[in-house]
Amino acid sequence: MDTRPVDHTTTDRRLGRLPSGSPVHATVHQYAGGEGPSVYVQAAQHGIELNGPAALRRLHGRLCDTAIAGTVVVVPLVNPLAFDHRSYVASASLDAFNPNLNRVWPGDADGTLQERMAANLWSLVTDADAVVDLHTGTADMLEHVRYAADDGVARSIARAFGTEYLLADPGPDDGEDHAGKLRTAAARASLPAITVELSNSRTVAHEAIEAGVSGVTNVLRELDVLADAPADPSGGVTLDGDTEPTTATTSGLFETRPDVAVGDDVTAGEELGTLYCPSSFDHLATVTAETDGVVYSLTREGIVVAGERLAGVAPRR
Ligand SMILES: [Zn+2]
C-alpha cells in the first residue's frame, strides 16, 4: 500500500440557485494520500438525519492526522434545502415535483432544483470506486446497512461497516421501490454502494455517531485506504431487503401491539398493531406482518394516512 500523510482540501461547490438568486452550496472535503482507490461518502440527504454529519466531523479529525492510500471525498451535508428547514425532504415550494433528493439520482442538469443538485454531485460519485450514503432512521428502526446482493464489493463493505443487521437488496434493475436512490443509481453505474441507516433521526445521538465513525473507518480499511484490517464484523444478521413494507390500508390512529418491538421475529399474518378511528373509536384494521422475518422498523408516530409505511419485516437469509 502506498500510504502518505493526508493532504486535506475543501471546496465550496455550487449545487444550484434559489428563486432569490441565492446559491445552494455544499462543502466538499477531499483527503488525498498515496496511490489507491477513491471513496465517496455523503450524508444528510434528508434534513433530520444529523448523525451522519456529526460522524463525518469526527472522522475528519482522524483522517487529517493519518496516512492513507487513495482519496476520500466527503460531502457531509448534501441537502441544505432540507437541513435548514429541519425537514426530512425539501419544501414543496422549492421542488414540488421531487421533494425527496434520494429519489432523483443520478439527477438531471436541466431538471428540478434537486435533480440539478444531484446531477452536479453525480460527477463526484462516478469518480469514485465505492460509495457510502449515510442516513439515519427513526428510533424505531434497527441500525442497518443496505447493499445489492449480487455485488461482492458492496457486500464486503456492508459487512465491514459493522452494524448488527444487513439488508440485501435485489439488483439495481429490480424493485421499483429503489428507483432514484443514490445506491441504486451507483449500482447501475457499476459502482459498489451502501446505504447506512444509523439510529435516531432528529437527534444527535452519541452511540449512532460512534457507529458511523467506526463504520466508515472500517469501510476505508476494507478498501485498503487505511492500512489496518477492519474490525471483525462477525455476528451480523443478513435479512432479505426485497420485501414490501407493511402499509396502512386506511387513515387513522395506529397503535403498535404493546409486546412487539424492532428486532423481534414474527410470522406471516402475526398482528403488529391496530388502526383505529380516533373520533368514532371504530376498529379500522388489524395490521399484520406480510412475511415471516425480523421486524426492522415499526412506526410509533401514530397518525397515519392510507398508504403510509407502518412496519418493515424482512426474512432472515
Ligand atoms: Zn435518509
Image (tube, helix red, strand yellow):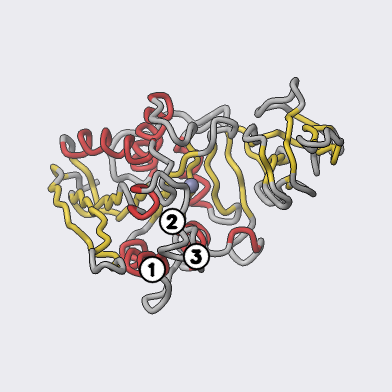
Q: Residue at x 51, y 33 (%)?
A: 163
- Amino acid type, mark 2: Ala
Q: Residue at x 23, y 54 (%)?
A: 28
Q: Is mark 3 on a helix, strand or loop?
A: loop
Q: Where is residue 154 in the image (x, y as percent from the top left)?
A: 49, 51
N-terminal of the two: label 1 or label 2? Answer: 2
Q: Residue at x 86, y 36 (%)?
A: 282
Tell me: 96 left or right of 69.
Answer: right
- Amino acid type, mark 1: Leu
N-terminal of the two: label 1 or label 3? Answer: 3
Q: How far apart are marks 1 and 2 (CA)?
A: 10 Å
Residue at the spot of label 1 = 113
184, above or below 45, in the image? below
Q: Which of 171 and 122 is in front in this view?
A: 122
Q: Is mark 2 on a helix, strand or loop?
A: loop
Label at residue 98: 3
Graded by Cα atoms within 10 Å as few (under 14), some (14 to 19) or many (20 or more), the crowding at tag 1 reads many
Q: Where is residue 204 in the image (x, y as percent from the top left)?
A: 38, 30
Graded by Cα atoms within 10 Å as few (under 14), some (14 to 19) or many (20 or more), the crowding at tag 2 reads many
154, above or below 186, in the image? above
- Amino acid type, mark 3: Asn
Graded by Cα atoms within 10 Å as few (under 14), some (14 to 19) or many (20 or more), the crowding at tag 3 reads some
Q: Distance between the residues labelled 1 and 3?
A: 8 Å
Question: In the displayed image of the protein, which residue is found farthest to the front?
Answer: 279
Contact, mark 1 vs mark 2 (Cβ under 8 Å): yes
Q: Is residue 296 visible?
A: no
Q: Which residue is drawn at 27% across and 50% down?
A: 72
Q: In which quarter of the image is the C terminus?
A: top right
Q: Which of 183 and 229 is in front in this view?
A: 183
Q: How far apart are marks 2 and 3 (CA)?
A: 8 Å
User: On the image, which quarter does residue 63 sit in?
Assistant: top left
Label at residue 90: 2
